[in-house]
Image (cartoon, rainbow, N blue to C red):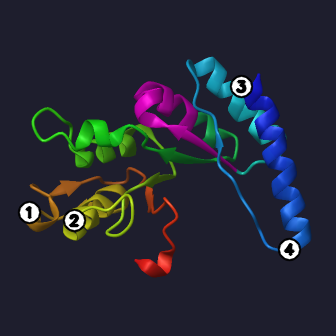
Amino acid sequence: MRWRDRFLFIAEATHKSQAETGEIKGHYLNATAGHCDEMLKRAAFAREIGAPIIMHDYLTGGFTANTTLAMYSRDNGLLLHIHRAMHAVIDRQRNHGIHFRVLAKALRMSGGDHLHSGTVVGKLEGEREVTLGFVDLMRDNFIEKDRSRGIYFTQDWVSMGGTIPVASGGIHVWHM
């Protein structure tokens, strides 16, 4: 159970760093595992040691597993950060891939509080207008058709909760 030792090490380091600096620190403990029972066990342990946020890789973990973890997180006061490892293998293949726009919609329906959305600079770089289209799809309740942003038809999400798009990969928000 190396994950348990890693969770404890990270929690200790986070608390120590906060005590030394007086600043709030955080780390997303990765609850992704081979099956739902193991993921729920990791999420429960993260909650037990005081972690406010856990992470799940929804493409490798699967959509049903993601929904299970999202419901557990919501019921237990945890935020669920969604990672998208492996997305480039899927969404950057023009001939046989699934566009990230579709993956972002599927994530919104399966649950999660925030998602690596890509940026217009850095290692997750994408086209500016298309990236902004992803952002709209993840967070807005009503999205007007806008082909320049990759939105090919008007979409009404009614009251379905959104997902907060976040940058990652060492990107500072002021670079955006």
How far apart marks 4 and 3 lie (CA) works out to 31 Å
First in sequence: mark 4 vs mark 1:
4
Q: Which mark is residue 147?
A: 1
Q: Mark 1 belongs to which amino acid?
A: Arg
How far apart marks 4 and 2 lie (CA) works out to 38 Å
Q: Secondary structure at mark 3?
A: helix
Q: Mark 4 belongs to which amino acid?
A: Thr
Left-right relation of 16 to 118 = right
* Crowd tier of the residue under label 2, counting other residues whose Cα lies within 10 Å: few below 14, some 14–19, many 20 or above: few
Residue for point 57% across, 33% down:
69
Does the residue at mark 3 contact the one at mark 2 (Cβ under 8 Å)?
no
Q: Which residue is mark 2?
A: 127
Query: Depth-wise, is mark 4 or mark 1 nearer the camera?
Result: 4
Q: Secondary structure at mark 1?
A: helix
- Residue situated in front as seen by the camera: 102 or 116: 116
Q: Mark 3 belongs to which amino acid?
A: Lys
First in sequence: mark 4 vs mark 2:
4
Q: Which residue is mark 4?
A: 21
